[in-house]
Amino acid sequence: MAGRRNSASSTRRTLLALGVGLAVIASLVATGAAGASAAPVDPESNGTVSEEAYLEPAPEPGDPYFEAAADDGSWVSYENPRDEYRTPYLGDGSGKICVTLVNENGEPVIGESVPNTSVTIPTNDATSWHPDADPMTVEFPMNEHYQFPLDGDQFGTDPDVAQGDGYMDSHCIEFHGFSEDATVEYGQAQLSGEHADRIDVAGYIQQIPEGEGWDTDIDPVAAAEPYEEAGGGWTYDAAENATHAQVTVVLQLDAPADERVASDGTNASDSEQNGSSSATATDRQTDESDPDETDETDEMPGFGVVVALLALSVATLARYRD
């Protein structure tokens, strides 16, 4: 009898150990699968934006739209139809007011995703002689309203470029001929039109370079400040070599996620409505697969191993019953 009890006890211990092992394995596999699906998605790498970046190389020397550059490499200028010289010319005071529109990833765009929309920037009487100022208005998409959608390279750096990274990123008006003690003022940007609610005013970047040119080694969104902090204008001061100043109004697109464009040019909502199996940007972050649409073996890595061990335990149990 003792031999039978010991045999039965041994059998129960073996089966218990095997069952515990299977439970641990299954728990680990399930935890791993859950962890994979819950991993955070980097919004700047998912490839889903309201509008693809607009890449327009800056004119190079010899190009008819390359205007001039400083001998010491401190600045570069490109032809701009909105560049005006005051008559009468009162002094060396000059400046720019620019608008930079970027997508959710901070890349320059021209507003093709927000048609029939505009931004207006009030200016004071000092600029009233400029045909595109008092106020300055930029209409989107820029390529439908202007000869040059973008005419300034305001941001980024490149060792082969005097200023900027070699790609246009801003839409500007320029003015020359102010007296050297004149004050130029601008008001807060006002958005209007069909898609005004899809554009955020990230802020303003005002610089008075004092002879050193515009500092382009900045990120437009990160460097943008609230209107009150940016300055709202400037006064020229020839004694301080401050005869040039400018401001860039930084705008950023912010459309609903399901209405943004994936990196392959498709629209997330269109793909869902058409029953397309193409992955959205968030799906691509997790092996370009949708956990709700893949089979169980994809959702549960190692599930086949668990099944095999479970089968082994059943076989073992059957043998001990025999």
Image (cartoon, helix red, strand yellow):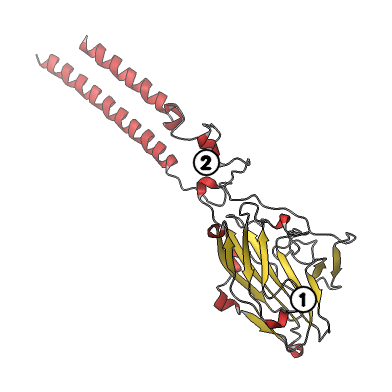
Q: Which residue is mark 1?
A: 175
Is residue 167 rendered to the left or right of residue 228? right
- Label 1 or label 2, whichever comes before in sequence order: 1
Percent coordinates x, y for residue 79 in the rendering: 83, 65
Compared with residue 312, is residue 58 higher up or lower down, i.e. above or below? below
Q: Which residue appears at 77% of the width and 68% of the height?
A: 82
Is residue 49 rendered to the left or right of residue 215? left
Residue type marked 1: Phe
Q: Are marks 1 and 2 in contact (CB under 8 Å)?
A: no
- Which quadrant: the N terminus? top left
Marks 1 and 2, Cα distance to the nearest angstrom?
A: 45 Å
Q: Quadrant of residue 245?
A: bottom right
- Residue 210 marker: none
Percent coordinates x, y for residue 168 in the rendering: 74, 60
Q: Nearer the viewer, residue 103 or 111?
A: 111
Q: Nearer the viewer, residue 139 or 278?
A: 139
Q: Residue furthest top?
A: 322
Q: Residues within 10 Å of mark 2 (few under 14, many from 20)?
A: some
Q: Nearer the viewer, residue 173 or 309?
A: 173
Q: Secondary structure at mark 1?
A: strand
Compared with residue 209, is residue 237 higher up or lower down, i.e. above or below? below
Residue type marked 2: Ser
Percent coordinates x, y for residue 221 in the rendering: 59, 64
Percent coordinates x, y for residue 310 in the rendering: 32, 21
Q: Which residue is mark 2?
A: 269
Q: Is residue 280 visible?
A: no
- Which quadrant: the C terminus? top left
Q: Residues within 10 Å of mark 1 (few under 14, many from 20)?
A: many
Compared with residue 140, is residue 279 higher up or lower down, i.e. above or below? above
Q: Secondary structure at mark 2?
A: helix
Is residue 44 rendered to the left or right of residue 183? left
